[in-house]
Image: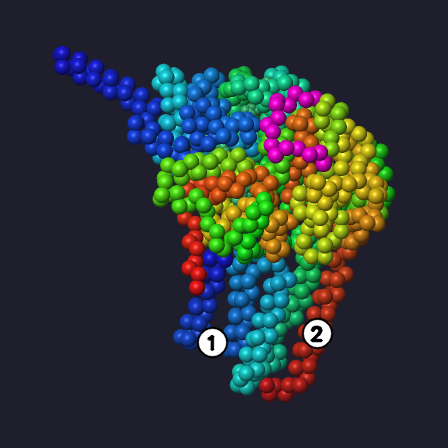
Amino acid sequence: MNIVPVAIIVLVMVAFSQLSKRNILRLNVVAWMVIWWLAIYFALSYGINPPLPASIIGMFMFIVSLALAAYLTTSTDDMEAAKSAFVNFIINPRYALPLILVMIGLPVVSAYNVYSDMTQPPQPPLSTRTIHPPPPPSITFKGKTIDLIEDENPYRALKTDNPAEFAKHVENGRRVYFQNCVYCHGDNMAGRGIFAHGFDPIPANFRDPTTIAMLQETYLFWRIAKGGPGLPAEATPWLSAMPAWEKFLSEEEIWDVIIFMYEFTNQEPRAKEELH
Amino acid sequence: MRNLIIFAILCLALTQLNAQQNIMGSDAQRAAGKVIYDDKCAQCHGYEGDAASVAKTYFRPQPRDFTAATYKFRSTPNGELPTTEDIKRSIRLGMPYTGMPAWPEFSDQELTNLAYYLKTFAQDVFEEYGSTPSIDLQSPPAYSDASRDRGRMVYEENQCLDCHGEYGRGDGKSAPTLVDQWNEPIRPADLTKRWTYRGGATRTDIARTFITGLDGSPMPSYSIEPIEDQWALVDYVYSLGGTDDKYNEANYSVAAFATPYKGDIVIQDVASAKQTYFQNTEVSTFPVVGQVVEPGRAFFPGVNSINIQTIVNEDDIAIMLTWHDMSAETSGGNDPSVELPIYTPDSPPDTMGQYSDAVAVFFPTQESGGPEKPYLMFGDSKLSVDLWYSDLSKSEAQVIVGKGIKSMEPAAEQNLQTWSEYDNGQWTVIFQRKRVQEGAVSFDQEDVFVPIAFTVWDGYNKERGNKRGMTSWYSIHIPTLQKPSPVGPMVETGFWTFLVLGLIVAGVKLRYRNGDA
């Protein structure tokens, strides 16, 4: 969301409602509907990041128009007021000049729309993807079944039981990371590796609290062992450059690099939920 | 009097100590620096600062050995030690396109501590010679084309082109022979890609780079007189990458766009085709990175970007690829599907004549009917890719159907033509084919995007098989040949809108003629 445009829109709306409440500005139903319509249009156009495609905005605005029309028809008084305002605008000679402006302005605007539509450079298709798809219950790793729900990192307990031994696993994980992962995930694990700019989706940033800090170690094991090709269809496996490390690394090396990822970024894996 | 002398001596000693401290920092600062270093830097630069590390052979240039006190990027004269600020700058901004990352997350204090700690790896040298002041670079006069033209002469006179090449593409005649202080092969910078300059891309930075030279590398230092000539050389180097500061950053494209061509496409050779067909077409540039996804990894690919220009007429599509390559390898051979071990740090690339340069552009063989594409790594068992492949030691192209690196077969139909040329550090390869081809990728529709990806093999770097430079999937737009003029539809829309409005107004006026709304 783009905070600034949204805040401006909200402020303008509040201002309008205050002005009309204090009777400084007299706004009838039609004026209010126009204001709402524009506010929603601007919010959709400028308030969302990444920007929505024009076709989606068009669809939303069609629905909004329908909703506003439906709202109008719920009250006969409002209907009457709207109708008389409309008719008045057309037949009252006081409004002759604005009417002429509308008669000229609207065709010009729609012609311009056609022009900009036809001359706009074509936009490449965007593909959306699910970042953390649900893992399978278990995977086969070099002939061995790893249960992603029940199993745990076999070296995790050493952290409290045998810190010296644990440190060896951290050090081994460091080696694995800097010989294999640093090119994409970066030396600071912030996703800024020397090849990161060549991949789309970009390599994950493990310092971001929404990645490894909210994942379990077995989830990481799955992602590291099976990589991009192991993803389900909604996560666009054909685009992810994340390698399937089962081709390169042993089981112990993968558990070690997982430990190192948490130690290096000062994060803890998400705890296993209690089974109920 | 005696007291005064003692006091004076004490003062002197204190200022000495102070100066010493300004070079080496305090114990506390160095200790704080060590903590960060052991955590973030030692895996590459070694715990002892001697670059004996797990990652050493995975980078080129290799991580710096700090015990030699050799620093490339300094504000001090050639052969002198860097200032604390110089070291801090190198850490903060890093060295783009090498293994040395930028560290924007460190505070100024942390950078200072790190710089002091780095100096301890060559403590004696820094204590003795570490206080050389920076060179005073005056600010440059405004850029001018006249100065650039003069700069070209300075460039020739100083033999920059011996290493950097005629057009600065890093392909000078001695380029393939260069090694650095550690006897590792090193390539001259491609001066046309200013965003890869590690010393900085502004005109002042360029001046500093050649005035100070890069210690430890073959890049010499120059003092160029008169000063007008110095800035003229700067302007020439600057112009090689485009005379706009926007080229200080990489400008990669999001997609490629084909341009319609009226008439037949009959290509004789690359030079004339460039003139006749590709002159006014849109150039898209995509980053090329090392293939590090599957075994046979390339950790320091020889090529870092590729350009594409495309034309289409009713029947044909012609794609022109260009990229910079230090030396053309046109003997030996290459094979995209040769099996390689996971990673073997190849011995120095002294292998002229063994592996040739090669290039491929590839597309999904069939439309998938959805967003789904063949797997980025040459396709998969479900969806295959069509590889348009050219081994540049041969004169014909090959179409290969890929279902992953382990399954690459020549296509049944081989109706693909190719032309290639190597000119002063730049390869140009053109592929031409009929737009429609049974059982292969077809460009039969208009105003659509077709997925496209590229791969480049630098034979001199021993790249073959999966050891290659690669790109992600991008897309190429196939345009409408007869672009309809917007005037007709514009007038039409305007007219109909006006008509509808007019009818409404007329209707209302008629109905409420008496003014009793």
Label 1 residue SS: loop
Q: Are marks 1 and 2 in contact (CB under 8 Å)?
A: no
Would residue B341 be counted in the magenta stretch? yes
Q: Is residue B225 visible?
A: yes
Q: On the rendered image, what quadrant is the C terminus of chain A found in?
A: bottom left
* Horizontal and vertical percent position of residue B266: 86, 38
Q: Chain of mark 2?
A: B
Q: Amino acid at mark 2?
A: Val
Label 2 residue SS: helix
Give the spatial CA distance, label 1 vs label 2: 30 Å
Q: B117 or A104, which lies in front?
A: B117
Q: How dense is the environment of label 2, judged by Cα within 10 Å: few (below 14), some, or many (20 and up)?
A: few
* Horizontal and vertical percent position of residue B112: 37, 31
Please tell me in which quadrant of the rendered image residue B468 appears.
top right
Relative to B127, is B403 on the left or the right?
Answer: right
Q: Mark number for residue B500? A: 2
Q: B75 or B511, which lies in front?
A: B75
Read off the residue under disc 1.
A26
Please tell me in which quadrant of the rendered image residue A273 appears.
bottom left
Q: How dense is the environment of label 1, judged by Cα within 10 Å: few (below 14), some, or many (20 and up)?
A: few
Would residue B91 be counted in the magenta stretch? no
* Horizontal and vertical percent position of residue B394: 80, 29
Considering only vertical position in the picture, is B273 above or below A231? above
* Horizontal and vertical percent position of residue B389: 76, 37
Q: Residue at x 70, y 70 (%)?
A: B498
Relative to B487, is A221 on the left or the right?
Answer: left
Q: Residue furthest front?
A: A144
Q: Residue at x 56, y 33 (%)?
A: B97
Relative to B234, is B447 on the left or the right?
Answer: right
What residue range appears in magenta? B336-352
